[in-house]
Amino acid sequence: MSPTYVYLAMFVYIIIGFIVAYASRKGMKKGIIEYFLAGRSTNGILAALSYSATTYSAFMMIGLAGFTYSGGVGALGFELVYLSGLALVAFFGPRFWLVGKRFGYVSPYEMLADRYDNKWIARLSAIVACIFLIPYLAVQLMGVGYLMNGLSDGAIPFMVGVGIATVLAIAWALIAGLRSVTWTDSFQSLIMIVVSLLILFFIVYKELGGFINFFSTLESKYPDLLSVPGPGFFNFKVFLGLTLPWFFFSISNPQVSQRLFIPRSLKAMKIMIKGFLAFGLIYTLVSVLWGFSARILIPNLAQADMATPTLLGSEYVPGVLGLIAMIGITAAAISTIDSIMLTLSSLVVRDVYHKIKDRPGESQLKLGKLFILVIALIGFLFASQQYDLIATLSVTSSVGLMVVVPTIFGAFFWRRATATGSILSILTGSLVALYLQFSGWKPLGHWPGVWTLLVTTFVFMLVSLITKPPAKKADEFMGYLDKELDKRNIL
Amino acid sequence: MTKRRLLWVVWLVILILSAYIVPYILLHDVNKITGAFLYWTLFALIAIFSTIKIINYWRD
């Protein structure tokens, strides 16, 4: 396809995105809570759409569709086990929200540091988040680069797409902080869902003879794709290794757990969760069915990650639809990138350099904005290295971030939990995750996620049992919660 | 409250374990759309409705 059309489609998307971002500034107040948490006053629908766009990235239509293309139905199970992990938010969501309002937390790690009465927990967790989320962010940038490159038949260089995505993410995060992020996210989430449904229905009805024929073709031509382990990729250990880190995503990834601070009320949080669950189920089914349709229409691809770009550029998809799909996937990537940048910047400001916290709000904000640029630059450089296996890198990020999960559970449900237990568990867990990931060693055939969770939990519990808990702080934190949870009928 | 929470947690653990056990043990040789594909979709719907049921207890 002519690069002019690709640029034109991007231009329209960018202009609308900027109009939305600037519109979000209306009524914006000053201050750090306003900038990073949109004043804790986001309504349910905006929170739901933004949560969806932040969670679901370019991985869905490229990586998950690729997994389905090569590994079959196991990809559906993997993503739906993740979605079922939202049940964690039914327990942790209102707890985060209540203590966030009561004690003024901006970042989830600031909350942990206060609960355990130890600033090193926040510092360490924030550094771990930067180490693991910047590759995840870079993978999204790469997704846009590959897509524009593929759709223009190589005429648009990879780095041009990466550059455009970086600039957009910076701009939409800087214009009004979380306000512009949630507004542009919502706009982008609508593009994502509408576009993905549109191209799936077009392909299924135009090329595959409707859903019944589509499923019969799948059953007759590729029966092994419909069971697990199927063609072999999704053997049980792989499935467990992939699903375990993603099950905890909603509390382990700070760019989404921070969103538990932003709804204006519990009612808004309910709408956020329900909206996201509906969005997630539809978007997952669409991405997986898209992967299956690619397998029928363009079999024998050497690289499964190329299934979506190849199908979009093939004779089966009209040029206009291919362009619209590119915008849908770009929207998925950018809405994830700007949220990560904003969250990481808040972690640096609130958790890494505590001295910044003592400065006036304006000074904290200036530094926060500067960090957004620094994080974007690092992500951009990382993306320029062009690592393969988009899906594997995304999963690695979730493995690393899982090291804070026992500390989060302990903060809300175990008075005996200690700061030393938390710090040592985060340290050892991170080292285990990094070592296993880089060495490629899979003890007893299990993936790094399994071992990381086991080691982190074991160290956290053992060390907590032999060290002194912050009893006064635990009483203040959990005492307040017990009272409020009871009053508000929260399980 | 604690007992009700415990019952929900037990139910969710069973449900989530089923997402591993049913497709890998009971449906591993069912090469049809009505096999693992249908099971995981139903599993997700039940997980979603369970989550909604829990959050519907909340009051502002």
Image: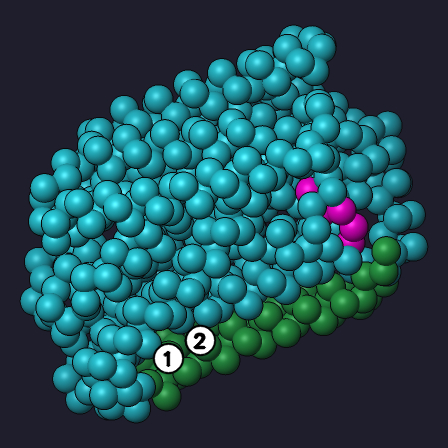
Chain colours: A cyan, B green
What x and y, as percent, mark residue A30? 71, 24
Q: Quadrant of residue A149?
A: top left
- Could one spot residue A260 in this view of the protein? yes
> Where is A309 relative to A181, above or below?
below
Rounded to the nearest angstrom, the CA distance separating label 2 from label 1 is: 6 Å
Q: What residue lies at 29% left-to-right and 49% top-to-bottom?
A: A9
Q: Quadrant of the C terminus of chain A?
A: bottom right
Disc ID at residue B36: 1
Q: Residues within 10 Å of mark 1 (few under 14, many from 20)?
A: many
Q: What residue lies at 69% left-to-right and 42% top-to-bottom?
A: A262
What x and y, as percent, mark residue B42? 50, 80
Residue kind at label 2, given as amino acid type: Trp
Q: What residue lies at 60% left-to-right and 55% top-to-bottom?
A: A48
Quick check: A90 left or right of A326? right
Residue kind at label 1, given as amino acid type: Ala
Q: Residues within 10 Å of mark 2 (few under 14, many from 20)?
A: many
Residue that badge 2 annotates: B40
Q: What residue lies at 58% left-to-right and 39% top-to-bottom?
A: A23
Q: Which residues are magenta?
A: A262-266
- Could one spot residue A463 in this view of the protein? no
Q: Quadrant of residue A45?
A: bottom right
Q: Are marks 2 and 1 in contact (CB under 8 Å)?
A: yes
Which of the two residues, A490 or A337, is positioned nearer the viewer here?
A337
> Where is A83 relative to A316, above or below?
above
Task: Tell me the chain of label 1.
Answer: B
| Dot 1: element | helix
Disc ID at residue A60: none
> Where is A215 relative to A354, above or below?
below
